[in-house]
Amino acid sequence: MDTSRSPLEATGFSRKLAATIIIVYMVVTLIPITWMVATSFKSVDSAISYPPEVFFEPSLEGYVNLFTNRSRQPKDYLDSLPPPDTWYEELVRSREMVITGPSKFLPRYSNSLIIGFGATFFSVFLGSLAAYALSRFKVPLKDDLLFFILSTRMFPPIAVAVPIFIMYRKLGLGDTHVGMIILYTVVNLSLSVWLLKGFMDEIPREYEEAAMIDGYSRMQAFFKVVLPQATTGIAATAIFCMIFSWNEYAFAVLLTQFNAQTAPPFIPTIIGEGGLDWPAIGAGTTLFLIPVMIFTVVLRKHLLRGITFGAVRK
Amino acid sequence: MAEIEIKNLHKSFGDFVAVKNSNLIIENKEFFVLLGPSGCGKTTTLRMIAGLELPTSGNIYLDKEDVGYLRASQRDIAFVFQLFALYPHMNVRNNLAFPLKMQKLSRSEVDAKVLEAAKLLRIDHLLKSKVSSLAGGDRQRVALGRALVRRPKAFLMDEPLGTLDAEFRELMCLELRKLHDDIDATTVYVTHDQQEAMSMADRIAVMNEGVVLQADSPKVIYNKPKTKFVANFIGSPGMNFIPINEKISPSQSSIKLLDSSLNIPEQKEGTDSNENFLGVRPENLKLVSENGVKGNVFGVEYLGSRKILTIETQLGNIKIRVDSDTQVNINEQIQFDTLNNNQIIFDGSNDKALQSEFMS
């Protein structure tokens, strides 16, 4: 018998099994995403060809269509125009169309960025203050308060869509960035407070006590000593908040229209404009995926410790 | 540096009383140890001096100024925590500089003070290290450095050696005491370890159940404990308590033990109770060949330089310290007697030591 190995270590077979399962899972989850990215680089014809093309000639038509509004023109009108200045004009002309202006994708996308990051920032900031207070101070009815905060997540947020819609209309918050940031912050706060309280509880009080003895106020001690040690928790919480705010669709459809519309309600509207433009939809969703992916990759080393927090005592 | 005075200090957490009307004066440049079993209120007392807890009632004076209800940051004292509380996101230099950053010093002044403290503690080669990469003893030194870098009025230490291994602990005891002397500090040190207390302290206050039982030099605490608790808590093994079934009267100088009589220091106080105790340390007893108290050897502990014998007698189990080359066997019949006149009579009704020729 091989005794050089600890009995707690995985055997060769179980390692291989684990690797196989992970690879199969990865393939299953990555196929749709790969297909979506591939579609974004196809031409309109190639995207709907049957049987589906796995190997295809790449085209930026999808991205051009995503960022522009176009109109179809008769051949003689196109011939009368001066030659196209840019590669994308040329691409559009070849489809017998002219560019009439930029599409709304960019403003919608930046709305998503502003609202997504704004809501994430406030969720984490307010959440960490509340979590610290609930972790350190004697708060009257603390347990009930914590339960109340959690209970706001016990129904799907959309269940209160109608009252929120009416409130927002009265308060003039409908279709504004501020309104959406407030809404997503409120929805995220319960998760943020609960997650962060767990992390705050794990940070020994001695750190802030040491700082307070060394002449710092409690607030200064919180920012200089407690928060840096809660980085892991903050990163994990921020990812969860970001993913929710970034992906949220129902409230965005209901409450935003012109000014503060985010990308999720906008992307499906591409379908309606001039037939089923799958490459443009693919391009929109691919670009939509990127910020949250970067955000997660940047914070990923904290994430694993974050979601298993409290499982092992240090 | 400073004198600390505690007056009628009282602290309760709900129904639990942590510190009961305690009074203490810690003198300037003194190394003062608060000693007691866990839960005796020693750490709570220290935290009240630091300003990390507010007293329920009573006062704390630092250099005659009442600081009992001031914020910790307004008291100019330093605190060394048991788990060091070094900031893990800063390197050693920044940990040391952290207390100075609140003092509006120029950068060069901060650097100079950090370097001075680091040199004093011989950690100047570690300034750029991460705290997490340090060994236990070095972490301890950084924690001390952070405390002394701004030269506070007093140092408060809460079992700072508790997490070090035994070998390091002895070394750090010496270093701590030397450091205290070198910088003319006033130090209040909390521990449950009597060896640490005895080896470092100018004076020790023994606490139990929130009450300061006695505050004296290690020698007085050991030889002339004022209560049964102190007598038992200090010394390993603790003092022997032999029940005496007679009332003690002032000027009495002998007591009956079984069928013989024993000379004791002349008493200055008497008792109302008939059940009192004779307290005698194991090293103040000796083996004799005749006219002693008879007993059976129940156990022998060999401790290198000495042996502790546990003797089963009609008066209960009694421990005697003998030289390590003394030959005794388990179950052997032996006799023992007192070595000198250092016995203490404890009043059975309140466990307090009676005043006598010896106890005065």
Image (spheres, rainbow, N blue to C red):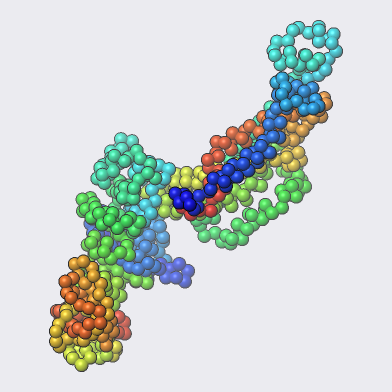
Answer with the quarter of the image where residue A181 lies: top right
Q: In this view, does A215 lie to the left or right of A129?
A: left
At x 27% / y 90%, what residue is drawn? B245
Q: Which residue is drawn at 53% across and 40% down?
A: A301
Most extreme residue toward the front is A1
Question: Which residue is situated farthest in the bottom direction here?
Answer: B259
Q: Residue at x 28, y 65 (%)?
A: B194
Residue B154 seen in render: no
Residue A223 coordinates in the image, percent (x, y): 47, 45
Spot occupied by residue B275 in the image (x, y as percentages of width and height):
29, 88
Q: Of residues A59 and B152, which is closer to you in this image? A: A59
> Does residue A171 appear in the picture of this structure?
yes
- Above/below status of B235 relative to B148: below
Residue occupying image coordinates x 64% and y 38%: A26
Along the horizontal axis of the image, is B246 left or right of A216?
Answer: left
Q: Position of residue B156 (x, y in %)?
A: 32, 56
